Image (cartoon, rainbow, N blue to C red):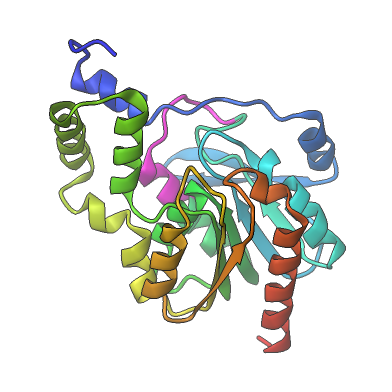
Amino acid sequence: MSTTESVDDLMERFYAVVKLPHDPFAKAFLGRCRSRTIKVGGRFYKYFQSGSGPAVLLVHGLNTNLGSMVTLADDLLAQGYRVVLLDVPPHGETLGTTGDPAEIRSLLRALYAQLSGLHAVVCHSLGGLWALTAWQAGTGARALVSVSAPVTTRFLVEKFAEMNGLDDDRSRELTGEIERRLGPAVWQEYSALEAARTLDVPGLVVHGTADDYVPPDHAHRLHAHWPTSTLELLEGAGHFDIMEAPELRETVRAYLRSLDATGP
C-alpha cells in the first residue's frame, strides 16, 4: 500500500466487496424459488423464497453471496420450513462494489418487518454482526442463530489493518474517518455485543474450534453478553467450511425443532 493513499481510498478499500457470481448450484436452487422485491430508502432489492412453512431468513457473510447458504437452505426446506435468501448489498448480483453498513441495516430491518411469521434468522460470519445490529424493538422473529460471527466493528478494523500492513497512524486515520462518516457512536451501534445485551429472544451461537479468521473467543463473548443464548462449538470446523458441515445442519435443525416444541 502506498503511504500517499488518501483516507477516502483507504475507506473504499475497507468497505470493498469481492463480487462473486452465483455458481451453478446456487442458480439451480434459485430456479426453484420465487423472487420478490422490497423498496427501502428509494431503492429496490431482490430476495428469494421457497417452501410454505415457518419462515427462516438466511444472511450470508462478507465476500460471498446467497449461494453460501444454499446447502443449509435445502436442508431446512426438507424439514418443512420456508427459506428466504438474498444477496446482501453489494454482494453477488446486487449493484455496487463497496458495502454500507447503514444500508444493510435498513434493508434487514425492512425484511424483518415484511416477512410475515418470521420464525428465525440464521446468519454466517459478518452476516451475524449485520443481523444482530439490525435487531430492534418490535422485530417479530422468534430467535436468531449466529454462526462464526465477529462481534465488533473494531475487530474488522484490526483485521483489515493486520491483513494490509497498516501502521498505527494509518489505522487511526481509518478509525477517525469511520467515526466521521457514521458518527462517534458507530462502535456501539455496530457491535453485536451491545445488541446482544438488549435482545429479548433466545439465540444459538455456533462457532468452529478451528476458525483461524474469527477466533472462537468471539462466540464465547457473544454468549456471555446474550443471557438467553446457547453456545455450540463444532470441533475442527473452520470459518468458511462450517457452512457445509453436516454437524452445523444437525445443530440448526435441533435448535429450530426446540423452538417448534415450545409453540408460538
Describe residue 235's horizontal placement relative to residue 144 as left or right. Answer: right
Tell me which residue sits at (40%, 43%) in the image: 103
Tell me which residue sits at (28%, 47%) in the image: 154
Residue 98 visible? The answer is: yes
- Which contiguous range is marked in magenta? 94-107
Q: Is residue 203 above or below residue 61?
A: below
- Residue 142 point in image, percent of width and height: 58, 76
Describe residue 76's horizontal placement relative to residue 62 as left or right. Answer: right
Q: Is residue 116 above or below residue 218?
A: below
Total marks shown come to 0
Q: Nearer the viewer, residue 207 or 194?
A: 207
Tell me which residue sits at (24%, 10%) in the image: 2
Question: Which part of the image, by quadrant, shows the C terminus?
Answer: bottom right
Magenta stretch contains residue 96: yes
Question: Which part of the image, by quadrant, shows the N terminus?
Answer: top left
Q: Is residue 75 above or below residue 154?
A: below
Tell me which residue sits at (62%, 44%) in the image: 86
Q: Is residue 253 above or below residue 103?
A: below
- Residue 193 point in image, percent of width and height: 34, 64
Q: Nearer the viewer, residue 92 or 163?
A: 163
Q: Nearer the viewer, residue 242 or 93?
A: 242
Residue 141 visible? The answer is: no
Quadrant of residue 28 within the rendered picture = top right
- Residue 237 point in image, percent of width and height: 63, 52
